[in-house]
Each structure stands twice: as structure tokens, then as C-alpha cells.
Image: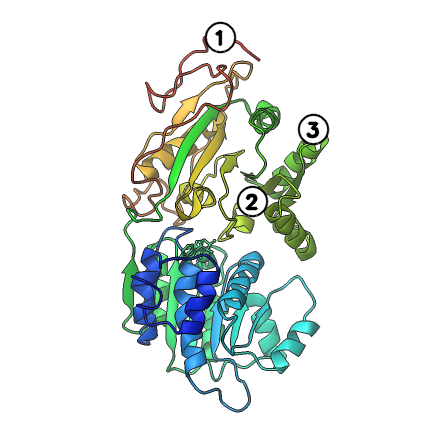
Amino acid sequence: MTFKDLGLSAALVKAVEEKGYTKPSPIQEKAIPFILEGKDILASAQTGTGKTAGFTLPVLHYLADTKHPKYRPLRALVLTPTRELAAQVYDNIREYSKYVNIKSAVVFGGVKAKPQIATLKNGVDILVATPGRLLDLHDQKAVSFKRIDVLILDEADRMLDMGFVRDINKIISFMPEKRQNLLFSATFSNDIKKLASGILKNPVSVETAPQNSTAKKVTHQVYKVDKKKKTEFTIKLIKDNNWTQVLVFTRTKHGANKLTEKLIKAGVSAAAIHGNKSQGARTKALKSFKDNSIKILVATDIAARGLDIPLLPHVINYELPNIPEDYVHRIGRTGRAGAAGEAISLVCSEEVEYQSEIEKLLNEKLNSSIIAGFEPTDTAPPKRAATQSKGSFGKKKKPGSSKVSNGSKPKNKPHFKANKTSGSNSGRGRTSAPKKKRF
Ligand code: ADP
Ligand code: MG
């Protein structure tokens, strides 16, 4: 199957070939023909499987293939939960639409509205936006939704988590009844299904099984370490392994700032990305990370969601998330497009329940070790993990709904030269007593 076989125009095929895509990914293969037929879609696939091109290409095909009304009204709208994701989807649209006569733009908050208003005034065919700023611009009559033909919700699950439902519904209320709706999500929760049933009309459900050609090869490694030793441990891990591109997750914005400062002090270039940073700082941090001018990006869950950082080899969970699904999203940042990746988690005594909730969700024990010199001594009791649906603590997850590791399982490589003090092959998911002290 090729992109041409899917019915996409030569101009679009040329652009994706220039991006180095040789064939459509499974979700693209499944979704694109239905979207070209004008059907509503409810699509779910793991992160990193090419959902963006999955909706962008057929929509661009449609926009280029149909006559523009004389004045260029907005005909397609992509809503995303975060500014970074909006910027990234827009970058993709620009690349894919290189050889077609389509005007695209992006609007999000945290930056001046004036240039956005000017861009919109010139006429835009496809707009990528975060809900809040878009509504502001609509209030100011800078944009109209009256001629929208296609509405796309990207990362719909995160939009729900971030409380955008009312904004989304408000935006939709200004649109014509007759339009195509595409909803993309990494997971299919009941809440997503509810949202979908209010928006989509006779949708085709498109799901790709976890076992597919772009399946991730991710190894999971837990290091048991005291809370107060985590920073030192992180620095050692990065330095000893000479890692040059690592995404580190912390649970709080404050924690992200503190760790970033300490990394920089230790001579490791780093920047933080989270909701309290100005948009300028967020954009700069992401850019520096992508172009390798800094080694470490320290992020909170929301800031990192949906971002495509190509071929990211390592993700470190400085703290485990208390929502097990967030672990799945975090490690979606590694092992992208079939490349191998490593997810390393530093787990202190307070986090052991978070770990077991994650293991339940993945249906897999995480390989767990202790490093000499960092033997845990903490006795603080475990905190309880949360579940995503509020008020349903301890509710059992649908098995396999967020599976991330599959296919042939890669082996864990040691991160420290012969100084790992507990084995990795035997006793999976258990820690044994240290044998030798090396550092
Ligand atoms: P998702 O939205 O599913 O998380 P993205 O759309 O961000 O995934 O795509 C992940 C990465 O895969 C991007 O770097 C993108 O350029 C790349 N990609 C997308 N489609 C293909 C393809 N058909 N072949 C190769 N790489 C692809
Ligand atoms: Mg995506």
C-alpha cells in the first residue's frame, strides 16, 4: 500500500515522500480512505503512529480539490489541547501542503493576538488552534466558523482532561450542522465516547491493534532510590551514559524548575517546560531541545503531551505519575516510529503503589534494580494512586486499553558499568539486596 493507492493527490504524495515517508502507517492506511469519503471518524492509535498525517493529508486533499469560495473562508479547523501541539501540527500541515494552494495558520494563547488577527483577515483555509484563544478571536469577530466543512479534534482525551469540553461545545455551536468531524485520541475512555457521541454522526471507528509495524520497542527500567537522592542519581545516570537527549518528567512545575537548576549547576544543559513558563520560554526550550543545543528537557505531563520529538532515545520519570495512564503517555515520547527506546523510572518508597498501578495497567512487571551507593533507606509509606475517572479509586482498568509495549520485547541494557547491584533477568519486578559497592 502506498500513499498514492490511498487516493491522495500527486502533490501531497510528493510532499510526504520528501519527508521520508515511504508508506502509510497502519492508522493512516485505515483512516485516510474513510476521511476522503467524507465520513466522520473516531480514531485511536498509540502515540507516535502518525495520526497527524492521518487526518491532515485527506483534509488537505479535500481542501485543494474543491473550489475556494471567492473570499477565503475558514473551511477546516484543528483543535489541540496545548500550544506546543498546535504549533507542531501546524508545522506538519505546512510541510504537507507545500505543493498545494492552501493557506494555513495557527493561533494559541500566551502570545500577541494582533498578528493572528491580521493573518486571519487575509483568509485561511485550515486553522490549527487551542480552544481558549480561538474563542477570544471569535468574540472579536476575527474569525468565523460559518463555513467550516471539517472539524478535527486532536488529542481529544487530553482536551477532556484539561477541561476544554465547554469551550469545544461553544465553538461547535457556531458551526454549520452539516460538516465532517474527525476525533483523534490516544485512548478510548468512556468520557471520550460520550464526547464523540455528541459531536460525530454515524462515525466509523478506526483503531489499530497494538501489534503493528510501528509498534514501540520500549524497555522499562525502575531504579529504587530515595527521594532525596533522585537528583544526584539523575545526574549520574545522564553523565555515566553520556546521554545527549533526554526528556525528564516531574510531577510538579516547581519540581521541574528545581531539577533544571540543579542539572545546570552540575554542568548538564537543561531547560524546563511547563504551564507557568511564558510561551516564549516554552517555545525556546522545545526548540533548543530539538536542535540539540540543550541535552535535557524537564517537563510536566501536560506540557509534554502530544509533542513529537523524533527518535527520542530516553525518557526518565524523575517521579512516577500518580495517574497510571500518564505513564503510558510519557513513554509515548520514546521509541517513536519503530525505533527502540528506554523508559527509566526513579521510584522511592512513597511511589511503590503508583508503580503497581502502572504494572496493572501495562499487564507487565517493570524490571527493577538498586544501584550501589543509592540503596534506598526511606521508610515513608506509599501514597495511593489515582485513577483517571474521578471518584472511582481502585476501579479496574480495561485490560489492554493503553498497552504500550508489544511485539518482540527488547532486553534491558545495564546503565552502569557492572555496578548494578540487583539482577535484571531473574526476579522480574523484584529487587534483591546489593552485592557489591562500586560508587
Ligand atoms: P501521533 O500523533 O500518532 O502521536 P505523529 O503524527 O506526531 O504521531 O507522528 C509521529 C512521527 O512519525 C512524526 O515524526 C512523523 O513525521 C512520523 N511519521 C508519520 N507518518 C509517517 C509515515 N507514514 N512514515 C514514516 N514516518 C511517519
Ligand atoms: Mg498526535
- Residue at position x 54%, y 17% from top? 374
Q: Is mark 2 on a helix, strand or loop?
A: loop
Circle 3/circle 2 CB separation < 8 Å: no
Colour convention of the picture = rainbow
Can residue 162 be seen from the camera position used here? yes
In-front residue for pair 198/225: 225
In-front residue for pair 336/184: 336
What is the count of numbered marks? 3
Q: What element carries label 3?
A: loop
Which residue corresponds to mark 1? 436
Where does residue 30 sit, x and y in percent of width and height?
29, 62
Instruction: Check mark 1 vs ligand 1: CB closer than 8 Å? yes or no.
Output: no
Q: Which amino acid does label 1 sit on?
A: Lys
- Residue at position x 57%, y 33% from top? 243
- Residue at position x 49%, y 8% from top? 436
- Residue at position x 30%, y 49% from top? 212
Lateral position of residue 123 relative to residue 160, left or right: right
Instruction: Check mark 2 vs ligand 2: CB closer than 8 Å? yes or no.
Output: no
Where does residue 349 sit, x and y in percent of width and height?
48, 24
In-front residue for pair 340/135: 340
Q: In which quarter of the image is residue 414?
A: top left
Which residue corresponds to mark 3? 266
Which residue corresponds to mark 2? 300
Residue 292 vertical position relative to residue 419 in the rendered view, above or below: below
Residue 292 vertical position relative to residue 33 in the rendered view, above or below: above
